Image (cartoon, rainbow, N blue to C red):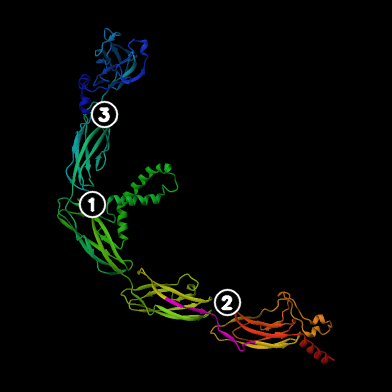
Amino acid sequence: VYTQEMLQSTEERLASTIEVHPPRILELLDMSSATHHKLSLVDVDQPLFQPYPSELIFQNFLSGQTYKLPLILVNNDKVSRQVKLDLQDSEYFHVVGPKDAGSKVASGMSATFTVFFTPQEDKDYHHRLVCVTERERFEIPVHAIGPRAILDFRDELHLPLCLVKASAQRTQLVRNIGNRKAKFKLHTERPFTVTPSSGTLDVGESMQVTVDFHPMTVGDHHQDLLLHYHTGEDVHISLYGASEELNICLEPDSILLKKTYISLANAHTVSLTNSSQVPLQYCWSIWPSQEEEDLSLLRFVCTKKLLFHHEPKATAIHHLPLLARTLQEYRSNAAKDHLLALSHSCITVEPVEGEIWPNTTAQFNIVFKPEEAKLYQQTMYCDITGRDSRLPLTIKSEGIGPELQLNYNLMDLKNVFIGDKNCYEVMVSNKGLIDAPFKLSSPDTTFGRCFSFSPEEGVVPSGACQIVEVTFHSRYMGTFSEDLLLAVTGQPKALILTFRGCVVGPTFHFNVSELNFGDIAFGFPQTLICTLFNTSLVPMTFALRILGDGLGSPSVTSAKQVSEVSRNNWQGSAARDLHARPVEFTVSPAVGSVRAMSDVTLCSNTLRRYRLALVVDVEGVGEEIMTLPVNARSDTSTAFVEHFRSMRQMK
């Protein structure tokens, strides 16, 4: 259509013009100043006169010659109306009106004007004619189209039938049949591509343009090839291609591999037969489709670049072009990423990519090399020419790890003395066919931190044994049950060795059941001796004190009080405040370790009955671990008798 239109003369272009459209109204006028027929049946958004043609086009002209076109203005109203042309000065265009110009035109009748065009150069010209009616002013565009390039493309281009994901192409020889040098650009959408995408052709020259068809889905495909001239014209060329699918499949499409020890490998073979007459390209992937592959790559790029993090939506939108460019960069390395992902997997395919020639069969080695003892199930996909969807291959197998055994799984330590180091031997046996690296660990708890191991880690060769020494040393008392973990490389679950027991304090006792001072004299010290025996297997650091004794100054003996005659001083201390009462008991030694024999001296400064207790505090265990009753009685009569005896002896 474009070629035909551009090759026509001015008269031929006018003769082929069928469609007309309303002109653009520039302004509305006051009808009362021009006519007494103020009402009109023509809508106000339509002019009273319809021009034909709607725009005047001169083309294929020669400079220096004069060309003319008629302009017909038809009265659309039901009454006679007046119309005239507002002539504008132009060096190249002028208008000649009818003989009765200025008179009214009857309803349905027309006024004919002649527009003359005299070009001086071979170039484009633009002008406009302004028509004035009783109600409005409207314009009629005038264009003079200079020399144009015309490439003789076909209106439709059909490409050969091809396999899905394969390629077909069609090459066309294109010649510039216009009268101007062609500077053009070509553009289309997937699954079509065009080469070259731009070019320049002198008048009469020709070049080859190739359209490639690379369908990714089965069926019919349509697109437009856009031809854009530098003079502004766009021409659309229809592209059509169809793709079909091959009947091809993996044999087998599901395999069950033998159980395999970690660090060892097992292999199986699958095949793929190309029964077509064209080579087929294949590539193994971990993604079931191209869409999921692109989505995974997009997530990776977004995470890598952090384009949308901590930004408002309005700001993030500006990063979309950058994201698209980054995605394209990563997609260019997608093949390497596939190979890297597959090579680091426990299940690999060899070869990963390649070509299958016509009427041949390709063999693929499926290699299973487990990294830990567990069930493996993975589906890999073969993306191959001729198949719309990727061919799935399901692989199942089981990894076998080292087979370590413990000679026992539970150790009951029963009662363990606090501070005592207890050592236990654990035998670790390797019953499997591969070496077993191991590492022992304890939980991060109060009693879990009391365990230590020698060795803490190591390797048990196949068929061998390893003795591990477990040491338990606690500074805390209480019942415990701790699971020690023997982690084996390649085994998802660690072996559990449970130690349980109770950490108890040291055991000890006195050689007497109580300290009974009986009746004691006021102010006269009296001493009793007792022995503390340590019956446990660990040293014990102890402290002895009298629970309930006063906290004031030391008690005063009768010798210090002999010069005092006043009876008030012999009444003793009647203070009830513990801090005001004197310290009346002395324990020696008050502290010690392992075992000890102690004496307890009582010097009474208080007239009362004593029912107290000698308590034992054990370091690291607690206070008042054991109590020994202390009994005594002090009164005034006994004090006077003792004082009298003392005075006689002094005399």
Between discs 3 and 1, the one toward the N terminus? 3
- Which quadrant is home to the C terminus? bottom right
Q: Is residue 354 above or below residue 470?
A: above
Instruction: Name the residue beneath numbered marker 3.
Output: 181
Instruction: Please tell me whether residue 512 belongs to the stretch shown in magenta.
Output: yes
For this view, does 166 lie left or right of residue 403? left
Looking at the rendered structure, the kind of residue marked 2 is Gly
Question: Mark 2–mark 3 contact, CB under 8 Å?
Answer: no
Q: Nearer the viewer, residue 64 or 288?
A: 288
**Residue receiving disc 1:** 389
To which residue does mark 2 refer?
620
Q: Alpha-carbon neighbours of circle 2 within 10 Å: few (<14), some, or many (≥20)?
A: some
> Measured along the vertical axis of the image, is residue 478 above or below residue 106?
below
Q: Earlier in the sequence, mark 2 or mark 3?
A: 3
The residues bearing labels 2 and 3 have C-alpha atoms spaced at a distance of 104 Å
Q: Nearer the viewer, mark 2 or mark 3?
A: 2
Camera-nearest label, 2 or 1: 2
Badge 1 amino acid: Ser
Label 2, secondary structure: give it. Answer: loop
Image coordinates for residue 284, horizontal then vertical, percent: 26, 56
Q: Amino acid at mark 3?
A: Lys
Work out whether residue 499 or residue 434 is closer to the camera in this orientation and state it: 499
Cα separation between marks 2 and 1: 74 Å
